[in-house]
């Protein structure tokens, strides 16, 4: 049963009939922007995340013992290093020759021997460890235990009654203050006693100590792959107790008989830049905490929530509500495959935005493979920036869901790798410009890594340049474009120097390369001109040409770009009606025809080179490919499929894929995406895919409800953004558009499309236009 807004209160009032009596206290707080549970977390993927951008914490919600697992975004293994292989450039001609001769296995063997980075693997993201809170004498909670995460207020709360006393524990990750802050309160004075200590899994064995009312963990990171450990780090907890007694012994700081305790957790490393580790983490932490010396919790909380809500509340989402949304979050996820629960999708949507706000802020590192949250010294896949899809997917929702500031760390990363990648381009390829391959890390390494069949893929930087240009396209800030265009131009110069003529087809291609991370069935993954590369380079060249037209053309460069663009290998449709993944019709020969990567469909999404209305034959071929690949895959790969089916206008099919993503096999109890294991890109890809169902901004057009599923007959998303610097609110009822409101952030003309009807809307900066449907046509009200 789907509910209107008028019936929501009636449903909430029915909570006592739907759940056991012990949970009634929790039901009073039921809302669409809250994750909540009736028991503490037993596993890491049940714990709840908070973050300040640079600092992250996972809260387990224990009663007698609480655990805050901590991360700082520059704590990675190793230190500055240069992974250039001096044999790479000499081996390049022979690798190309072997590929052109069809000797793919031999090309791979040679590339593995002489073309890979040194070392062959990059550094891993690491954890600080745990801040442990032990509460002596506190037994099990009573029946009113609840832990929750309010994603609108960005606060995690654990509450329960024990021995007749009501306890509340609140945790925030404050970007304004740069700390993780914890408040412990109780309904009875003198009821709070806690022993604080650190536990770290780092083999470097950091040392904990007590300095007055501060608990300190200090140490170094770990070496890796022959790269020495070069980072110092410190985590410092300032303990503020009202009443009671505070004392320290060894590595334990104890508070006994307090009325209230506030903990301020600061953490830093000696990292200053990818080639500079001369920072002083102790001085940084002391300065952070000194600024908060007289600041009360209430003010910290208010400023934190104002900061968070200033970003989060830009977008409102409603897909409808049912009784299912009264259940605890873990139970909703378990039941989601067979339950009508549209507000679970809305919660997942906004949770993705919450996570990006918490892990990517100006001045922080970009969101890595796990955002910022990782409990291991060597994270799955190193927790690196995997730029053959995963890093880009992290940022797919940023521009359209009104979080453009959060892209700044990604653009800063591109600037860094344009520097390290310039050295790599010259040494490996003898080329101008800059290059990076399928991964990078804190140290901005740009060499091919892991193995030739995974790593010899030179278009990672070019794909990132799409985000650099998209940031302009959504905001239309010419000064920004002037500042970043050299990054795009440098990437384009690399390809102008390294594209080669395919002797069989007579077109310009990348060589050597792969279609990530798929074996084509002819001895290897290595090939010339995989479809994804051609599409990414085409986007790069086209966006450079657009920038040249805006900024004032470098005529010689423009001529060079156009000549190369016109010779790029075109898309091809294979014998089975599929969009070919390679220049040869090899799709049916691939070792895994259900491969998680759908790299050759980049042109459909995130690019707009292929669409149902501009290139219908190619769109049909892309659909054939998707049908062959199948819907069920790893978490992030399901999310990519969600976006692709939305681009095809297949709303009900897209919704079926969303159900797979939200099910317990691909969503953990804390709503983290499961590859498995946890990868945060699936969360961000899910938010992006739901946006694409409601609003698409492509081919210089704005599409309203292009893939609305029948499962969401009534709803809205407000606060979205489209290319051309325009805000868009979309509302619908009975499966039909009721209104759309466009608000211009810059002067412009916008072509709006809905259900076959097209309308031109001209707006000056600050103007709005309300659009409705009359007699089947989209009109301005």
Image: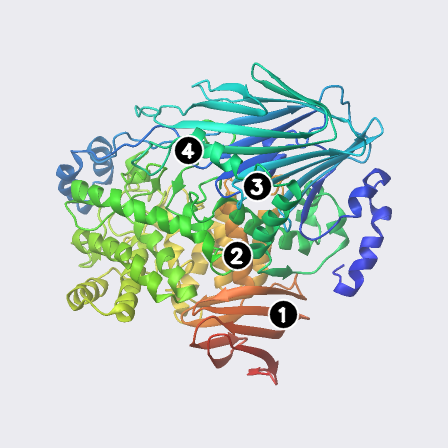
Residue 367 position in % (x across, y down) = 45, 44
Q: Are marks 4 and 1 in contact (CB under 8 Å)?
A: no
> Can you give x and y, in whole percent of width and height, for residue 5 in the image?
75, 64
> Which of the two discs, 2 and 3, labels the residue nearer the N terminus?
3
Asked if labels 1 and 2 touch by Cβ distance under 8 angstroms, the answer is: no
Label 3 to label 1: alpha-carbon separation: 33 Å
Q: Earlier in the sequence, mark 3 or mark 1?
A: 3
In which quadrant of the rendered image does the C terminus lie? bottom right
Please rate how many residues cluster around mark 4, counting C-alpha atoms within 10 Å: few if below 14, some from 14 to 19, many from 20: many
| Residue 638 visible in the snapshot | yes
Which residue is tagged 1? Answer: 731
Query: What residue is drawn where x is 72% and y is 57%?
Result: 321
Q: Earlier in the sequence, mark 4 or mark 3?
A: 3
Q: For mark 2, what is the residue?
A: 689
Query: Callout 2: 10 Å neighbours few (<14), some, many (20+)?
Result: many
**Closer mark to the observer between disc 2 and disc 3:** 3
Q: Earlier in the sequence, mark 4 or mark 2?
A: 4
Assign the N terminus to one quadrant of the image: bottom right
Distance from disc 4 to disc 3, alpha carbons, whole Å, reads 24 Å
Question: What residue would you read off at disc 4?
Answer: 382
Residue 158 vs 650, above or below: the answer is above
According to the picture, the residue beneath numbered tag 3 turns out to be 173
Instruction: Find residue 456 and report its image quarter.
Output: top left
Q: Nearer the viewer, residue 267 or 92?
A: 267
Q: Secondary structure at mark 2?
A: helix
Checking the image for residue 63, the label placed there is none
Foreground disc of the pair 4, 3: 3
Above or below residue 378? Residue 412 is: below
């Amino acid at each position: 049963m789907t509910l209107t807004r008028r019936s929501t209160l009636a449903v909430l009032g029915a909570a006592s009939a739907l759940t056991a009596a012990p949970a009634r206290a929790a039901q009073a707080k039921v809302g669409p922007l809250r994750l909540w549970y009736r028991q503490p977390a037993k596993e890491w993927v049940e714990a709840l995340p908070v973050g300040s951008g640079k600092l992250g914490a996972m809260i387990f919600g224990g009663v007698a013992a609480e655990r805050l697992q901590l991360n700082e975004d520059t704590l990675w293994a190793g230190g500055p290093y240069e992974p250039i292989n001096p044999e790479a450039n000499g081996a390049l001609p022979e690798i190309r020759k072997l590929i052109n001769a069809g000797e793919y296995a031999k090309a791979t063997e040679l590339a593995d021997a002489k073309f890979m980075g040194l070392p062959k693997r990059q550094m891993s993201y690491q954890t600080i460890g745990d801040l442990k809170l032990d509460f002596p004498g506190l037994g099990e909670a009573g029946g009113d235990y609840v832990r929750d995460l309010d994603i609108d207020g960005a606060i995690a709360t654990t509450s329960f009654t024990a021995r007749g006393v009501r306890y509340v524990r609140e945790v925030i990750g404050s970007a304004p203050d740069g700390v993780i802050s914890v408040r412990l309160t109780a309904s009875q004075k003198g009821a709070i006693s806690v022993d604080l200590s650190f536990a770290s899994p780092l083999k470097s064995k950091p040392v904990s100590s007590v300095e007055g009312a501060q608990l300190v963990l200090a140490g170094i990171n770990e070496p890796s792959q022959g790269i020495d450990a070069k980072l110092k780090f410190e985590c410092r907890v300032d303990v503020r107790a009202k009443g009671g007694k505070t004392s320290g012994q060894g590595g334990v700081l104890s508070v006994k008989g307090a009325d209230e305790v506030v903990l301020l957790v600061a953490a830093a490393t000696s990292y200053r830049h990818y080639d500079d580790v001369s920072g002083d983490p102790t001085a940084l932490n002391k300065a952070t905490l000194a600024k908060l010396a007289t600041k009360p919790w209430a003010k910290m909380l208010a400023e934190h929530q104002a900061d968070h809500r200033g970003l989060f509340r830009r977008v409102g989402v409603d897909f409808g509500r049912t009784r299912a949304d009264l259940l605890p979050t873990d139970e909703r996820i378990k039941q989601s495959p067979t339950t009508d629960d549209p507000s679970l999708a809305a919660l997942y949507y906004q949770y993705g935005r919450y996570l990006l706000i918490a892990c990517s802020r100006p001045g922080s590192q970009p969101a890595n493979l796990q955002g910022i949250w990782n409990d291991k010294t060597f994270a799955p896949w190193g927790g690196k920036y995997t730029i053959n899809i995963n890093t880009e997917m992290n940022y797919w929702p940023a521009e359209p869901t009104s979080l453009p500031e959060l892209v700044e760390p990604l653009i800063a990363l591109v600037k860094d790798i344009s520097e390290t990648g310039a050295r790599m381009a010259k040494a490996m390829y003898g080329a101008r410009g800059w290059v990076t391959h399928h991964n990078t890390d804190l140290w901005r390494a740009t060499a091919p890594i892991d193995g030739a069949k995974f790593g010899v893929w030179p278009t990672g930087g070019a794909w990132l340049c799409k985000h650099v240009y998209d940031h302009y396209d959504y905001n239309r800030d010419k000064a920004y474009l002037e500042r970043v265009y050299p990054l795009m131009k440098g990437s384009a110069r690399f390809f102008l120097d390294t594209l080669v003529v395919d002797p069989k087809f007579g077109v310009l291609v990348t060589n050597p390369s792969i279609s990530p991370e798929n074996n084509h069935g002819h001895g290897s993954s290595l090939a010339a001109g995989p479809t994804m590369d051609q599409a990414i380079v085409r986007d790069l060249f086209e966006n450079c040409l657009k920038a040249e037209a805006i900024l004032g053309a470098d005529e010689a460069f423009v001529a060079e770009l156009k000549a190369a663009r016109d010779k790029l290998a075109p898309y091809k449709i294979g014998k089975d009606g599929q969009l070919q993944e390679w220049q040869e019709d090899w799709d049916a020969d691939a070792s895994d025809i259900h491969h998680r990567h759908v790299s050759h469909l980049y042109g459909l999404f995130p690019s707009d080179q292929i669409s149902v209305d501009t290139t219908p034959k190619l769109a049909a071929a892309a659909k054939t490919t998707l049908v062959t690949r199948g819907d069920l895959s790893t978490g992030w790969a399901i999310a990519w499929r969600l976006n692709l089916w939305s681009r095809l206008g297949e709303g009900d099919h897209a919704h079926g894929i969303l159900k797979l993503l939200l099910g317990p096999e691909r969503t953990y109890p804390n709503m983290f995406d499961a590859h498995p294991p946890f990868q945060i890109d699936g969360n961000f890809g899910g938010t992006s895919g739901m946006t694409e169902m409601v609003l698409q901004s492509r081919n210089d057009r704005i599409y309203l409800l292009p893939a609305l599923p029948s499962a969401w007959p009534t709803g809205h998303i407000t606060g979205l953004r489209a290319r051309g610097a325009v805000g868009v609110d979309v509302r619908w009822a009975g499966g039909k558009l009721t209104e759309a409101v466009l608000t211009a952030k810059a002067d412009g003309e916008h072509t709006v499309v809905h259900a076959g009807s097209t309308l031109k809307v001209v707006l000056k900066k600050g103007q709005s236009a309300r659009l409705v449907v009359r007699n089947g046509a989209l009109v301005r009200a």
